[in-house]
Amino acid sequence: MTNNHLIAPSILAADFANLQQEIEMLNQSQADWIHVDIMDGMFVPNISFGFPVVSAVNKHAKKPLDVHLMIVEPDRYLKAFKDAGASNITVHYEACPNLNRTVQAIKELGCTAGVALNPHTPVSILEDIVGDLNLVLIMSVNPGFGGQHFIKNTYKKLHDIKELSSRYNPDLLIEVDGGVDQHNAADLIRAGATVLVAGSSVFSAPEALSAISNLKQAGN
Ligand code: DX5
Ligand code: ZN
């Protein structure tokens, strides 16, 4: 059986001193999107990078930028991220008191609208908004750092989001982010994931290109 899941390598694990080369490698690879993690030191206990870096990445990238905002009050910066090159913008449920408004604002910018859930946030809270979303991102580690261990309860959450998706939004993209590698990729796809984010398992591999192609073939 073939499947058509997407692969989104996370540049959080890339060599920032050679970012152009890393992006060119991703351009040549079987990656579908480039995952860009934005951390503000408030929503998560770490700071990654901001607009100048996203724009610089976008200058070289030939694939859509999948921007994951781990920041408080993301509404203040949606347009700036769109202008910096974002195709997809994902905000955290836990950071958005007016989530419906935020999602509409992302769509009005012409971007794919995603909502991310922290490991402790149940999928069921999305019932009344899932029909308006393009993408749900299930965090399979606590957000803030690359290279952490995959949390197994993610499989239960995939089951739950698949159920909501089949009821309210069959086109929903289901993204898994954190601790994804060639050992769990096939299981995640079978469980319903349609987009796999991978940072360290791609950029710390001896051959990043083959790590990406292994993830792309997983489950076939
Ligand atoms: C974590 C980020 C992830 C991270 C994944 O807060 O959202 O995208 O880069 O890194 P790995 O694949 O190393 O767990
Ligand atoms: Zn991420």
Image (cartoon, rainbow, N blue to C red):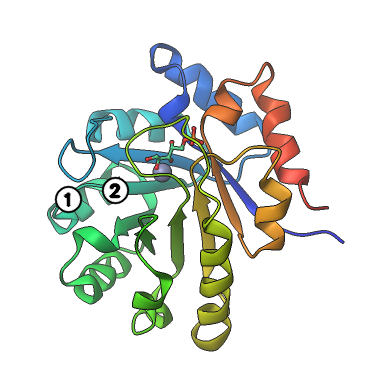
Estimate the x, y position of residue 9 in percent, counting from the top left.
Answer: 54, 37
Estimate the x, y position of residue 72 in percent, counting from the top left.
Answer: 16, 51
User: Is the C-beta separation of discs 1 and 2 under 8 Å?
Assistant: yes
Q: Quadrant of the N terminus?
A: bottom right
Task: Choose between 143 and 6: the one closer to the eye.
Answer: 143
**Badge 2 amino acid:** Leu
Residue at the limit of the structure toward the bottom, as seen here: 167
* Rendering quadrant holding ligand 2: top left
Estimate the x, y position of residue 105 in percent, counting from the top left.
Answer: 23, 68
Q: Is residue 159 above or below residue 91?
A: below
**Badge 1 amino acid:** Tyr
Mark 1 vs ligand 2: CB under 8 Å?
A: no
Secondary structure found at label 1: helix
Q: Which residue is mark 1?
A: 77
**Residue found at x 39% / y 35%:** 58
Task: Choose between 209 and 204: the one closer to the eye.
Answer: 204
The image quadrant that residue 141 belongs to is top left
Q: Which residue is mark 2?
A: 69
Q: CA distance from mark 1 to mark 2?
A: 10 Å
Task: Choose between 200 and 111: the one closer to the eye.
Answer: 200
Task: Choose between 212 and 160: the one closer to the eye.
Answer: 160
Estimate the x, y position of residue 200 in percent, counting from the top left.
Answer: 53, 28
The image quadrant that residue 204 belongs to is top right
Q: Horizontally, is 125 left or right of 100 in the view?
A: right
Q: Nearest to the eye among marks 1 and 2: give it.
A: 2
